[in-house]
Structures are given as structure tokens and as C-alpha cells.
Amino acid sequence: MTPDVRTIPTNELVQRAQRNRIECAVENSGCLVAISLAVVACVLVHLTNVDLVLKSILFGAAVAVVPLLSFTAIISAAGFRTRRVVHELNRRFGRLPIQSYVEELRGRMTPGTIACVFTGQGLPHGGSYFGQILFDESGRATVKKSFGRNSYHDTGAFAWEGVEYDDRLLPETTAKEIQSIAERTKGTGKAEFEPIVRDGFPVRLAVVFGDGTKETIISANLCGLTEEQERDDRIKLAKLVASTVCDEFSQ
């Protein structure tokens, strides 16, 4: 029986995600095979006895569609064995859409609980951060976080570079501050704060409430804020969570 990938330790998943020699060879052949099939398709179109308009359409498909489909099929074949493992690593390291974490949390949260889901990336050459802060009914909070390098390639062709940290309790003062501001963002829905810098530290933060209230989702670049944005509770919360999750970010 195949074990549930969620029960497998991260270091073992990393080993399973590595491509073997055959898979690497299949992936590396993708461009050559796609071009070869496109050439063959063009020759076959040239040999067909059809009118000029249809032949032009077929040539266009041979040049554009055939290589695209063949290349996609080859890459998919190379990653078929590791797809579930890579997806689980992406989940653990915050590389999935933030809404997927929101939906997962909603299924197991109870009234009186709050969860903060954070993703952030240091640009242009920093790391990718992911964290979850979970508050129980008593207000006690635990934080789970991970860190990965931007160089990771979703196909798994390169070595995974990431660190997953054990769950830990937040200091009571920090927990109360985060919970207080999170409560004040309740019912505000989605908020996107326009960046004023190109790089910096773009983040996304989702606040999920156990009582069924619509989640608050915040998108901002924490290194490109105006004075007015700095006074917004949602930005205050994003910065506070960022400083809790990220080693390279400080308020």
C-alpha cells in the first residue's frame, strides 16, 4: 500500500523528488524531440495535396502547436513518478496558491480559533518564506515555518534547497498582539496595496476565522509602503507576522 505523502518526513520526500538518470534524459531530450517532430510535421504538410489556405493553416499548426504539445508531454512524462512528492513539498514550503491553505484550514478549524497563513519572498536574490500561526480557543499560538531558495525549479530537476522548522509556541506578548490586530481585520475581505518599488519583500497573508467569517487576504510589498499604508491595521499585521516568520525581515 502506498503511504500518504503527508506522513513522510521532508528529508525523505526530498530524496524521492530527485529525478533518476532516465527521467533526466527524457527531460533533456524535450527540445530536440519537439523540434524534430515539428520538422516532420512540416514535411508532411508540404507533401499534402490541399489548397494554399489550408496548407498555410497546417504549417502554422506544425510550427507552433506540435512542438508545444510534444514538449509539454515529454516534461509531464519526466515528472510523472515524482509529481505527488513534488506537490507535497510545494505544499509544505508555501508554493501553492494561498487559497488552497485557506480551504485546508477551514475544514479543521472551530469557533474561537484563528489562523494566519503567510508567504513572502525577498527580491531580487532573497529567499522564499512560508508560515502558519494557529491560535486555539484560549489564545495560545503555535507557529510553523519554512524557508526555501528562489532557485528551486518546480520540475524537481534541481536539488531542493529548503529548511523546515519545528512547531513552536509564540511568546504570549507577541501572540496577543497578532491576535488583537487580526481580530480588527475581520470582515475586510481582500486588500491589495500597490507597491512603489520594483523589488523588496512582496508578501501575501490570509487570516482565517474559525467562526466562518470570510477570510481576510492581504497582498503588499512591505519594502514599498506609503505613510498612509503603514497606518493600516492590515499592513501592521502583515509586518508583524513577517517579522515572526522571516529571519531576513525586521520591522
Image (tube, rainbow, N blue to C red):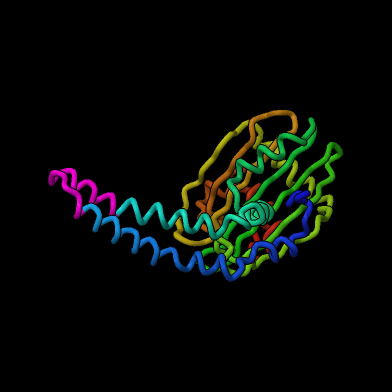
Out of 126 and 32, give the one closest to the viewer.
Answer: 32
Instruction: Locate residue 123 relative to residue 18 in the image: left or right.
Output: left
Closer to the camera, 104 or 179? 104
Q: Is residue 169 left or right of residue 28?
A: right
Pinpoint residue 17: horizontal percent, then vertical percent.
Answer: 65, 62
Q: Is residue 226 above or below residue 123?
A: above
Secondary structure mainly formed by the magenta segment: helix
Q: Is residue 141 left or right of residue 59?
A: right
User: What x and y, as percent, mark residue 66?
Assistant: 34, 53
Residue lying at the far top of the rendered structure: 212
Q: Is residue 199 above or below residue 98?
A: below
Which residue is farthest left? 52
Which quadrant holds residue 209?
A: top right
Could you tell me which residue is drawn at 74 percent across and 60 percent down?
A: 10
Residue at 81% across / 47% down in the picture?
141
Is residue 51 in the magenta section?
yes
How many numbered badges does the structure rendering display?
A: 0
Which residue does the image show at 78% across and 36% down from the upper left?
113
Quadrant the C terminus occupies: bottom right
- The magenta segment: 46-63
Does the magenta segment cover residue 23?
no
Q: Which percent across, then down, holds residue 221?
A: 53, 54
The answer to whether one can see residue 240 in this image is no
Q: Is residue 53 left or right of residue 196?
A: left
**Of residues 133 and 151, which is closer to you in this image?**
151
Q: Position of residue 74 (x, y in %)?
A: 47, 58
Look at 52% across and 61% down and name the residue there: 200
Report if residue 147 is visible in the image: yes
